Image (cartoon, rainbow, N blue to C red):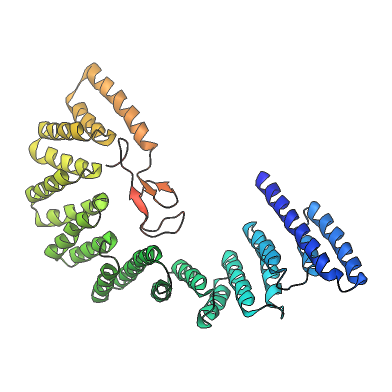
Amino acid sequence: MIQSLGLSVVLLIAVMVGLLLGWWLQYKYSTLSKKTFAHNYYRGMSYLLNEQIDNAVDKFIDSLNVNGDTLEIHLALGNLMRKKGEAAKAIQIHQNLLNSNVLTTRQQHEAQLELARDYINAGLLDRAESLLQELVELNSQYKEQALGQLVEIYQDEKEWGRAIHAANLLSEATNEKEQKELMLARAHFCCELALVSIEESDFTQAGKYLKQAIGFDKNCVRASLISADLALQQNKMDEALIAIKAIPQQNPNLIPASLPLLCRVYEQTGDEEALLAELLLLEERYLVNDLLLVTAEKLRKLRGDNAAIEFISARLKVNPSIKPLIKLLDIHLSQSEGKANENLHLLKQLLDKVIAEKPNYHCTKCGFVGNHLHWLCPGCKTWGSIKLIKGVVGNG
């Protein structure tokens, strides 16, 4: 309710300023125009104060002629309507601008870009795409913004090939930071294409897409994970291991994502001792809790409880963290009885509750948090921005 009131106040100010400017511009032409303006002004204000937005906007359009001096006011009101969720009114305002024949080419293109954004907001992606493609083909001053919108449209529609093409064009007109983000995005687009090819059992094409992904981003962990899984499906254990072992160098924080695949490789070969050796080697180099937990469980299975207790205790002295402590309590619980067991169980319940309330991942760009790894942030729609949360209650 407060937010709606705030937007209404902004809208009121915008309409008042717009109508006053319109009155000044029209005053030079005729007294009749002035009277017409006054009539529409008071009608518009009445509609607005009674929250009759449709009628207020109609009166605004009638009262304020479109020209270079009033363009910004029309655009501001149209954008405000879009933000309020009034897609139809935003479209009406921006279409009214495009129908005018007094704007410069640059101003027409600006209105066209805003209308495309209205269509996107309304879910009319085909109409938006047509307007944006025209801006690109005309080499408009708004070409860069149009390409950015096209990338988002193709991404939402899962047209990954067209998304790559639009991103390639956009990359030519952006700065170094934006180019890096586009490289990451294109790597993920290639990964998406690889997954489609795998579903169609076209493993050769999938492999080509994965190579393209690494070409765009040599540190693309997702491409390595898909490559490892693809190799496993074809019983190519050596290739799977090569892909998995590349991940710690690409991004140590994403080692947990590779552990299920690493375990599958050695399980299929039946060499659990080799798996344990590999886990211990990784764990010695990288302080990641999920890696520690998997290593401890494998050590417990092959060497017994005491070996696992000693291993976890040593690591806790170096890197205190709740998750390994819970694992240590689990092992002690299996060895304890009576009151000691009851106290350990209460302590474990408390720590489990603390961990359950803490997310595992967060977006470094918008702050989104969650318990699962997302390649595309659900909040800000940025590729590769989700990172593992570290610290005492985190994963590292």
Q: Is residue 80 left or right of residue 260?
A: right
> Residue sitting at 31 percent across and 40 percent down?
394
Foreground residue, 168 or 129? 168
Q: Residue furthest bottom?
A: 138
Instruction: Let me know if residue 353 appears in the view.
Output: yes
Q: Is residue 144 above or below residue 293?
A: below
Instruction: Let me know if residue 88 appears in the view.
Output: no
Q: Residue furthest front?
A: 28
Q: Residue 52, located in which quarter of the rendered image?
A: bottom right
Foreground residue, 356 or 103? 103
> Quadrant of the image for the N terminus?
top right
> Quadrant of the image for the C terminus?
top left
Q: Is residue 227 above or below residue 340?
A: below
Q: Residue 192, located in which quarter of the rendered image?
A: bottom left
> Residue sitting at 38 percent across and 42 percent down?
359
Q: Position of residue 2 (x, y in %)?
A: 67, 44
Q: Is residue 362 above or below residue 135?
A: above
